Amino acid sequence: MSLAVTGATGLVGRFFVEEALAAGEPVTVLGRTPPPPGFFSAPTGFRPYALGDRPDLSGIDALIHCAFSHLPGRYRGGEGSDPEGFTRANLDGSVALFETARAAGTGTVLFLSSRAVYGRYPPGTGLTETLTPYPDTLYGKVKAEAERRLFALASDSFTPVALRATGIYGPAGPGRAHKWQSLFDDFRQGRPISPRRGTELHGDDLAAAARILRDTGARGIFNASDILLDRHDLLALMARAERIERPLPPRSDSPVSAMRCDRLASMGWRPGGIARLHATLPALCRPCPAG
């Protein structure tokens, strides 16, 4: 099979590319510019693409759509002062891509959606795929509507999948910052850090979920989440790894709505849990000083 990925050089998209390359699958990056030399572990193809374009998808068997236009570092609230432009780029642009893929004979389109579609459900709610989307941000509304528009294109030869992901962590590509870089830097510098906890998933586990869905020909909506992580505990691990002695932020007492991932689990998906976080942390920290 041949795979195309939008947003391939972003933190999340990179994991899909690397998983496919490791499986020996040809990968085509869809983006404004080719990836920097050596960015991926093996060569990829490249075709020009920006949100709103209708790219050349000839010969592409499967598409993973990760590209999203937003203010740097912000998803919820990423529209800034231009909600119309945000919607035009991300919703209209995604729909144009879905339609192009269907017309080109691409058999599977996997859309990277978000737990943000569940927005207004009360904290502590167990979030399942059968719940009606209830977004409370423009980001969540755009994701939910893009899902709906994708599934409206379904046919016997066109398989739509929405993968509703929680926060994704893991090493970034060469020259890029991982998602907790600024948090770690704030802690190193002794800056104030507010209490927070949320659900997290390693990017490799997200890519493994996508592989299962593609290999089985599954269609529909699937939640992807793993651990509930408090900043206090994350920074405690980071402080130990870097030998930093500094007070930790207090634990959060806010309830969290965790996504239920029974659908993926029934297909054999097993994320790495807290053990994977421990194994990944050294790659996210500075080397310990000698002595």
Image (spheres, rainbow, N blue to C red):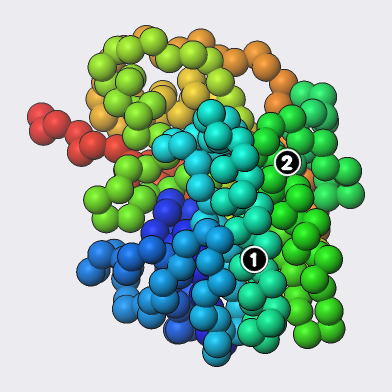
Which residue sits at x=69%, y=45%? 142
The crowding category of the residue bearing disc 2, from other C-alpha atoms within 10 Å (few below 14, some 14 to 19, many at least 20), is many
- In this picture, residue 164 sits left or right of residue 25: right
Which residue sits at x=62%, y=68%? 97
Distance of label 1 from label 2 (alpha carbons)? 17 Å
- In this picture, residue 162 sits left or right of residue 211: right
Residue 118 percent location from the top left of the image: 77, 38
Q: Quadrant of the N terminus?
A: bottom right
**Above or below, 65 relative to 184:** below
Which residue sits at x=83%, y=50%? 129
- Write down the quadrant of residue 200 in the picture: top right
Q: Nearer the viewer, residue 63 or 86?
A: 86
Q: Label 1, on which residue?
A: 96
Q: Amino acid at mark 1?
A: Ala
- In this picture, residue 85 sits left or right of residue 216: left
Q: Helix, strand, or loop for circle 1?
A: helix
Residue 158 image label: none
Q: Nearer the viewer, residue 280 or 260?
A: 260
Residue 263 percent location from the top left of the image: 80, 58
Q: Amino acid at mark 2?
A: Lys
Residue 28 percent location from the top left of the image: 44, 77
- Write down the quadrant of residue 181 in the picture: top left
Q: Quadrant of the C terminus?
A: top left
- Write down the quadrant of residue 122 in the picture: top right
Q: Earlier in the sequence, mark 1 or mark 2?
A: 1
Q: Are marks 1 and 2 in contact (CB under 8 Å)?
A: no
Which residue sits at x=37%, y=43%? 178
Residue 217 visible within the image? no
Q: Label 2, on which residue?
A: 141
- In the picture as drawn, the residue positioned furthest to the left comes out as 291
